[in-house]
Amino acid sequence: MRNPFARRAVTDLPPPAKLAAFVVLVVWAVVVLFPIYWLFVTSFKTPYQVDKGPFYIPFVDFQPTLDAWRYILVELGNDTLRPYVNTVIVGLSSSVIALLMGAAAAYALVRFTYRPRVGMIGLGIGSMAFGFGAAALGAPVVLAAASAVAIFVTLAQAIGRRFTRSMGNSDIAFWLISQRILPPIAVAIPLYVLFQQVGLLDNIVALIITYVATNIPIVIWLMRDYFASLPRELEESAAVDGASIYRIVRSIVLPISVPGLVATFLIVLVFAWNEFLIALVLTSANAQTMPLQVAAQNATRGPQWWAMSVLILIMIAPVVVMAVALERYITKGILVGALKG
Amino acid sequence: MASSDSSLELGPPEPVPTGSALRGRATRRATDTLDAWRSDGAARWLFIWPAVLLILVLSIFPLVASIALSLSKLAFQQGGIDLKLVGFANYQQLLFGLERSHFLGVLKPPNPNGWAIVLATVALTVAAWARAARSDHRRPVGLVLRLVGGILLVGSVWVVVGALASEGGRPGALIVTLIFVFVGILLQYALGLGLAMLLVQQVPWRRFFRIVFLIPLTITPVGVGYMFLMMTDTSKGPLEPIWVSLGLRDFTWVTDPWLARLAVIIGDTWQWTPFVFIVLLAALESLDQEVREAALVDGAGRWQSFRHITMPAILPVTTTIILIRLIEGFKIIDMPNILLGGGPGTATQSMTLQAYVDWNTLNLGRSAAISYLLLILVSVVATVYVSFVRRRVTDLA
């Protein structure tokens, strides 16, 4: 029993409810935008004007000046440009990689069943710990890695046969997300040592690797729910027709997952874009990112509000542009059409 | 390999409702092909190993290194620094020694209300454990774990009550963090869900709102901290007229611990509501509208359709959002640090902030110990949450 006018009935509210909804939305938009507006006007103020009290409207309340913009964009010049380019490269590449790897893992966790053996996990962790331990005690990195692999291979047969208790997909997923629990403050110094060993300090590659690793669990968890909510009939009928799994993923799963992929991409992008503490520890001059520049504006003379406002504004501009470009994909229709059409 | 793994179980055979013979044949054919699909073993491993391997390599070393750090003390000597192993001294300091009032809080005997809460918790825990012990499918390991969990629960309720529902008690970093996390998540979820629900409707300026609501998430947390420092400035900030009309001229937030905590929670909510919003928006948008339409046509009310169609469909992603916010929320640091420096006193000092302060003063051992206590606490909370809440609402767990 399908009513051709039903779509209207669901998404169209009666006028009074629509008005109420609109008012609520406007109120929240003001809550969101007012601080941004304040950043905007602050960026055109002199230190004196900031200090004298709240002035709201340029040309009416106060005479705007481009001093702060000139300071950040012209005087600092390359010192703003370099971290800016770094942020763009690190943010975009790490979130694209995290999205690819995470979405693949999420799909696998939804559609396949894994039975990792407890014994093998213990052995794997044990031999890795041995490798790290040996390296920490001064053994050459290659030797440490080789001995870790050797231990794993030698014992794999024996242990694999003896300890057969196994875990499931949910345990894998939980282990992945639990890697985000330890606060960055505890992770930063060990990461510093790790990247020092491989010579990647003050290098954006180190940041990209770290952000990919920290964001994959988020991607996996968000996309797992999303993939699980997709109807299986489409994939099954494609499998019946003989499509390979790569083809099914490419031509069916990914196209109908676009809303979830876009939302997830935006989230991991801003996580990588804005990360502070790990960037602080892993970089010194060449690979610095924008959050460090923002924090640096709190100098000994107190926060330089005007410069900080400029930095925050130029930092959010590309993300907002990207949100504008991608928002249209967070919408219905694709899936419904594919299924019912 | 394929024999021990069942990679894709066919659901109960509802998808093919016509005739049992036809159904049998269709199922067999599908199973054959799916067997071929399953033997496509490369994809099975190719899809998951890169992610697992990368995280393994990057997580095991920090995990091991910081536990070693938490058991030692940094000492400065001529020509360098020296790590001295001190056993559990750092933990002992935090939980029982010098730093206890800072970390756990000042604990006093509970007042009558406090006693009521403690006794109710004990009774409920004992009842739950007894029920688990009497149930049919019990395992000794499970019972022991439940017992440990119950003791931990009663213990933490005792600490919270001793700090909050007692004469002269004062919460420490641990309890302050818990307050930030739970109140924050509640507000963020309620707001995020409400806004997402409104924006799947046809309202004017729909796209504008959808984009604007994302903006707080795009600002670096340090920046948000400084922004709220401006907002809460009662003499030069933009909200000065409001503060003045409330009689708060020259008021400093550093005088009232609860107002200070409220300011932190408001800032945190401002920043993280968009996260809930965008995930729920994507989930709501991919709901099958026709089911709702059919329900409405059949005379179901809006509330009924929300309660019985929308809510079950977004419940799995809801539990994911709450889990992620739980894990991220426990690491709150920038807002209390920039807004109030953890003050008044240590009233808004979260666990991560306390770890950061120790870190800055090169007390790396204690900093790592706090991080590890945080890891244990969040692991327990997240495990309980996943096994008791998420497994109930989704088969994914």
Image (cartoon, rainbow, N blue to C red):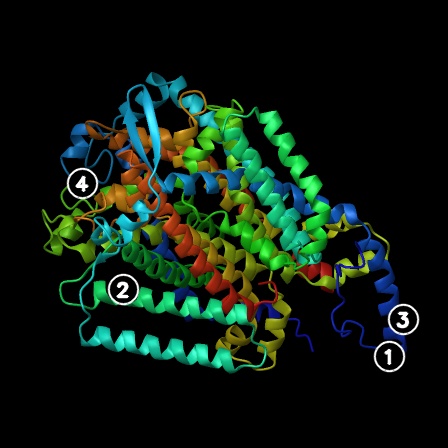
Q: Residue at x 57, y 34 (%)?
A: A131
Percent coordinates x, y for residue B150 in the rendering: 40, 70
Element under label 4?
A: loop
Mark 2 in CB contact with mark 4 (< 8 angstroms): no
Q: Is residue A52 left or right of residue B292?
A: left
Percent coordinates x, y for residue B146 in the rendering: 46, 70
* Image disc number at residue A54: 4
Q: Quick one: label 1, few (<14), some, or many (20+) residues within 10 Å? A: few
Q: Quick one: label 4, few (<14), some, or many (20+) residues within 10 Å? A: many
Query: Which residue bears the numbered disc 3?
Result: B25
Mark 1 in CB contact with mark 3 (< 8 angstroms): no
* Image disc number at residue B160: 2
Q: Chain of mark 2?
A: B
Mark 1 and mark 3: Cα distance apart in space? 9 Å
If you read the primary sequence from the N terminus, does the residue marked by circle 2 or circle 1 appear first? 1
- The nearer-to-camera label among 4 and 3 is 3
Q: Residue at x 81, y 60 (%)?
A: A237
Tell me the amino acid under the disc marked 1. Answer: Ser
Tell me the amino acid under the disc marked 4. Answer: Pro
Determine if marks 2 and 3 fall on one subunit. Answer: yes
* Quarter of image, res A144: top right
